[in-house]
Image (cartoon, rainbow, N blue to C red):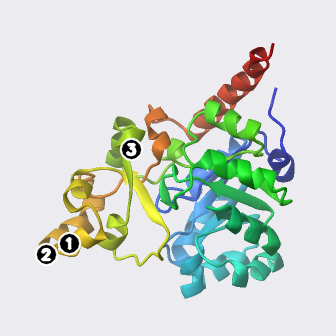
Amino acid sequence: MPISTRLTKELNIRAPIVVAPMAGISGGALAYAVGRAGGFGFVAAGYLTPEKVLRELALASGARHGVGFITWRVLQDPAAFEAVLERKPEAVFLSFGDAGPLVSKVRKAGALLFMQVQSLAAAREAASLGADVIVAQGSEAGGHGASRALGPLVDEVVNANLGPIIIAAGGISNGRGLAANLVRGASGALIGTAFYPARESLAHSAAKQRALAVCGDETERTNLFDAARGLNWPDGWTLRVASNVFSKRWRDAEGFASANSSERANFADAASVGDFDIAPVIVGEGVGLVERIETAADIISRIEREAEDALRDAPQLLR
């Protein structure tokens, strides 16, 4: 029996699964596959030019999908954001920064507004701005995030009765994790790491294999890789990645400041040549539950089935 929540009803999807807009990973092919499989996918605008974003969007055509943006980058350079809004996207995902100046533009385009938050205060702000969906993100999540653990954050946001649909993000890579957050009161889950090694993911094949080989113990939050990539992320957000030789050597941005030009050049080339002892594999604590490379449809089907089984088993705990 399919799971029915406010999220599935609002988006008219079968599974309460939204695939995260992972920069460099969530392209049009993944969003298309997720939409066709009964979930909802986001194309990650990330650090892409308008032309590249629109190219990925074309690949998602024919399936339910939205577009995800890094808010502070949009405020610095709105070109990709404006190009996407001209295409009237079904949904826009904003995270990391003051979304206030952008909300009216999203509304004018007729898109549903997803806003990701890392605190109760930010959730209240998102509700006041008119978010349709609030994504409560815990520090377990891969990629950028803050410091709060997912469980208590979801509990507080749900208890606040803010009005928008609430979904959970961070460390959710299987159906038990989805079911647990549904029981907490969330209407679904934003899932990224489980789809990192999907066949339709843009991740390098060597990065996918590295993701299969590590567990949550082997991830860390750090500002190192942003410094190495020359990305001036605002204070308060760090990146969760799989630890590797590079991170163990330099530790953080302050340590990398002493790197010479040759070492910086090696880092710049590492991802393109598949050297993930140096380049980052950006995954969350749920990576230990990711065991194989498979299609997005297979991943959604398995998570959905596991969640249904967990929810059916839960009443047996009552005496």
Specify the quadrant that holds the N terminus. Answer: top right
Which numbered marker is on residue 260?
2
Residue at position x 29%, y 61% in the image: 272
Circles 1 and 2: CB atoms closer than 8 Å: yes
Kindly report the distance in space between the C-alpha atoms of the residues bearing marks 2 and 3: 29 Å
Q: Position of residue 265 (x, y in %)?
A: 19, 72
Residue at position x 74%, y 64% in the image: 91
Which numbered marker is on residue 264?
1
* 177 relative to 87, above or below: above
* Callout 1 crowding tier (Cα within 10 Å): few <14, some 14–19, many ≥20: some
Query: Which residue lies under the disc numbered 3?
Result: 208
Specify the quadrant that holds the C terminus. Answer: top right
In front here: 29 or 313?
313
Q: Position of residue 112 (x, y in %)?
A: 79, 65
24 displayed left or right of 296: left
* Callout 3 crowding tier (Cα within 10 Å): few <14, some 14–19, many ≥20: many
The quadrant where residue 58 appears: bottom right
